[in-house]
Amino acid sequence: MTLVHPPGTQAARQQQLAAAYAHCAAIAAEHGKSYFLATRLLTPDRRPAVHALYAAARTADDLVDLPGADPVGDLTEWSRAVLAELATGWSEDPVRLALVHTYRRYGIGVDHLVDFLAAMTSDLDVDSYADLAALDRYMWGSASVIGLQVLPVLGTAPGVTREEAAPHAIALGEAFQLTNFLRDVAEDVDRGRVYLPADLMAAHGVTREQLAEKRHSPGFAALMREMVAITRRRYDDAAPGTPMLAAESRDCVRAATDLYGGILREIERADYRVLDGRVSVSRPRRLAVFARRLTAAQLARVRVTMAKPKSRSSTGA
């Protein structure tokens, strides 16, 4: 792989890279409050990479969800640019620059990015899924590979390979994605897309027209109840993976799981009335989860530092 050295001094390049990561952190803070809060529990050297992965996913997703005059062309051009820049090692776009640096630094497979971009492209013309298997195939690119991208950044415990931890990272990515689907039913149908399996909708007497009209019903509540149960099973599949991670990364994942799992609880408390408006975890609840995990995360860092007194941390830039 040929690395193109960008113009300017090494100091200027480092400054541009640091600014790119800061830009990604701002995107994460604005659009993914629970996610961003959980990342505060990571070691400082890991946070920028996770912010870069989030910002890139958010940027591509927005090209689809908040399209301009030419959404197909915009996404195609963005995809072409980032894949070319990944090969050369540099970009003048801050989100893509941080993503390229993260991919190369952690040895993340380019196939994950290709699969993600393919899923985003499918959102431009696929607006429903026949069953859970079809939804799972879509989620491979929209969610599973996100877990696989983040895994090298989080690191694994001694004696644990990425391959051993991968199935659990995949399950957690899917659990987060399903949680978002259930929370965002109303917003998604307004964009012309439904991420609830059509066969389960039919089994509960729920129609696409009902979703578009935001009409709650006992059947819709039953459908949501079943989908919440399916989603919780994905969280259960993911749980054994947390102890496989590097010790200093585990509390970030536990916090993110608590926060996203909290969305499911809020859906239940709202009697599954997600068509009436978006449910969310309250700020006090988010801060309580963060505070509970903070001490454990700090202790984990101390133990790792004491076990490896000669190790040196690198910066995200």
Image: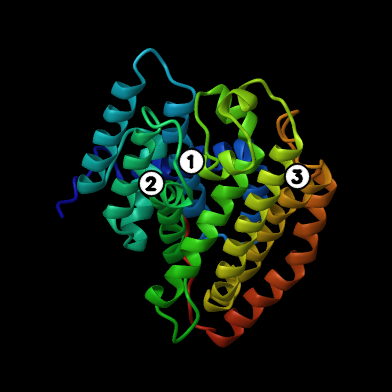
Residue where numbered disc 2 is placed: 99
The crowding category of the residue bearing disc 2, from other C-alpha atoms within 10 Å (few below 14, some 14 to 19, many at least 20), is many
- Of the numbered discs 1 and 3, the one sitting upstream in the chain is 1
| x, y percent for residue 258 | 71, 59
Q: Is the residue 66 above or below the residue 136 in the image?
A: above
Element under label 3? helix
Depth check, mark 1 against mark 3: the one in front is: 3
Residue at far top of view: 69
The front one of 287 and 309 is 287
Residue where numbered disc 3 is placed: 267
Q: Is the residue 316 above or below the residue 9 in the image?
A: below
Depth check, mark 2 against mark 3: the one in front is: 3
C-beta proximity under 8 Å, tags 1 and 2 = yes
Instruction: Determine the image quadrant of residue 196.
Output: top right
Distance from disc 1 to disc 3, alpha carbons, whole Å, reads: 26 Å
Residue drawn at 15 percent across, 55 percent down? 1
Tag 2: amino acid = Leu
